[in-house]
Image (cartoon, rainbow, N blue to C red):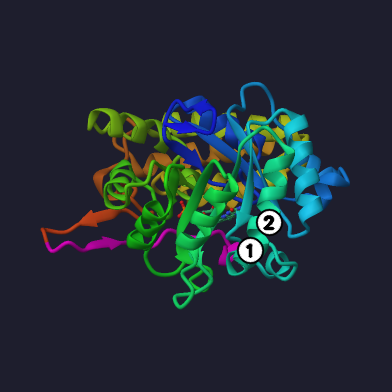
Amino acid sequence: MRLGPYTLSSNLFLSPLAGYTNLPMRLTVRELGGLGWATTDLVNARSLLERSAGAMRLVTTCAEDRPMAIQLFGSVPEEMRDAAVMCEALGVQAVDINMGCPVKKVVSIGGGSAMMTALDKTAALVRGMIAAVKIPVTAKMRLGWDDANLTAPDLARVLEDAGVAAVFVHGRTRAQGFSGRVNLAGIRAVVQAVKTIPVIGNGDITTPEAARHMINETGCAGVSVGRGAFYDPWIFRRTEIFLRTGGLTPEPDLTERVRVLRRHFDRYLEFYGEENGARQFRRVAPWYAKRFGPARVFKQAVTRITSRADFESALAEFASWRAQFCDGHGQLLEKFQPEKMEASFMREDDGSGTAEREGIRVPKGPVEVW
Ligand SMILES: Cc1cc2nc3c(=O)[nH]c(=O)nc-3n(C[C@H](O)[C@H](O)[C@H](O)COP(=O)(O)O)c2cc1C
C-alpha cells in the first residue's frame, strides 16, 4: 500500500503503545518481518521542543527503524507545528497526531480525544502543521467521544481536506475505553467518508484471520496492531503471509519465543543501561510468558530482575521447573499447552453473521483507559 509518497512493504502497522513501542520493541518486531510501518509512543509536543530527556528518548531511532512516524500530542497550534518541523529535521518519515487518547492529562489540555470534539479548531491546527513540513502528517483517532458523538467520519473528511496523508482509527469511542467489541461498521463509516487517503483500521487484532476480517468488513487499506504485538511479535509476519497467500504458518515454538525475548531484553539493556533496562523489562517479559504454557516460576522471577545475570537465572530456573510438564522430548504434555489463543480472536459463527470475541488484556496502570 501507499502512504503519502511511500510504498510500504506491507499494509500492517504497529500501533503506538505508550511505555512499550520504544526503539528496542520496534527493532525486535521489525526483525521478525511483515511490519510495514511503526510509530513511536505519544510524545508531548512541548517536551519535544524543550528537548526534555524523556521526549528525546522516545524519538530515538536508527537506520534500521524505518519507515517510522513520531506521534505528537498537544493542542497549541504553534507548538504542534514547531514540533512537526523538529520531527522532520530528525529524519523520520511522518508525523502522526494523537486524537484518540482519553487519558485525563492529555484531554484536559485539549489534546488526544478532545480533538475529536472541535473539528474546526483541529483542522486549523493540522493545516498549520502540514504547511510547515514536507513529510506526511497522519492522524490517529477513535470513533468519537461517545456513542452519541461518533465524529470520526466527519473528522476524517475534514482532515483529508486539510491534507493529512492517512487516518488511523481505533474502532471504539473514548467513553468505551477498551470495553465491548471493536465496531467494524464504525470503521467502515470512516473508510466511506474519505475520498482517497488510506484508512487504517485498529482494535483487537491478535490473529491473521482477525486482520483479514477487519479488512473485508470495513474496506480499510491496512490494519494496525497494538496489544496483539505484546504477546506475539510474530503476528506481522504471519499476517502478511496469510493476507498474501491464505496460508497460516505455524506459531513459534518455545525456543523461538525465548530467542526473541532475549533479543528484546538485550536491546533494553543497550538502550537503557543494565540495571534500568532490566527493571523496565520486568513488565515486558510477562507478555511473552503468556504463550509459554505453565510459566509461574518465570513470571515471578522476572519481576525482580536488576541485571542480565538475574534474567538468565530466571530463564534457567524456568527451564528446569518446566520439565515436570513435558514428555521425554521436552514437549509440553497436551493438557499443559497454552490456550491456543489466550488473547482475543475472532470466531465467526456458522452463518448468523455475528462474531464472538474474547477480551484482550490491557496492561495495568493509568493507561487502562487508552
Ligand atoms: C498500554 C497502551 C498504551 C497506548 N499508548 C498509545 C499512544 O501512545 N498513542 C496512541 O495513539 N494510542 C495508544 N494506545 C492505543 C493503541 O494504539 C490502540 O489504538 C489500542 O490499543 C487498540 O488496538 P489493539 O486492540 O490492537 O491494542 C495505547 C494502548 C495501550 C494498551
Quadrant hosting residue 364 = bottom right
Mark 2 highlights which residue? 124
What residue is shown at x 44% (from left), y 69% (from top)?
Answer: 179
Left or right of 180 on screen, residue 74: right
Outermost residue, top direction?
A: 63
* Beta carbon of the mark 2 residue lies under 8 A of ligand 1: no
- Relative to 192, residue 118 above or below: below
Name the residue nearer the viewer: 149 or 263: 149
Outermost residue, front direction?
A: 161
Query: Separation of disc 2 and disc 1 at Cα?
Result: 6 Å
Left or right of 273 on screen, residue 143: left
Q: How many marks?
A: 2
Residue 37 on image: x %, y %: 52, 34
Residue type beneath disc 2 = Ala
Outermost residue, right direction?
A: 50
Left or right of 184 on screen, residue 196: right
Residue 210 on image: x %, y %: 31, 48
Dot 1 crowding, Cα within 10 Å, few <14, some 14–19, many 20+: some
- Looking at the image, in which quadrant does ligand 1 appear? bottom right
Quadrant hosting residue 366 = bottom right
Please report the bounds of the magenta region as a residue range: 352-370
Mark 1 highlights which residue? 120
What residue is shown at x 35% (from left), y 56% (from top)?
Answer: 188
Name the residue nearer the viewer: 279 or 249: 249
| Circles 2 and 1: CB atoms closer than 8 Å | yes
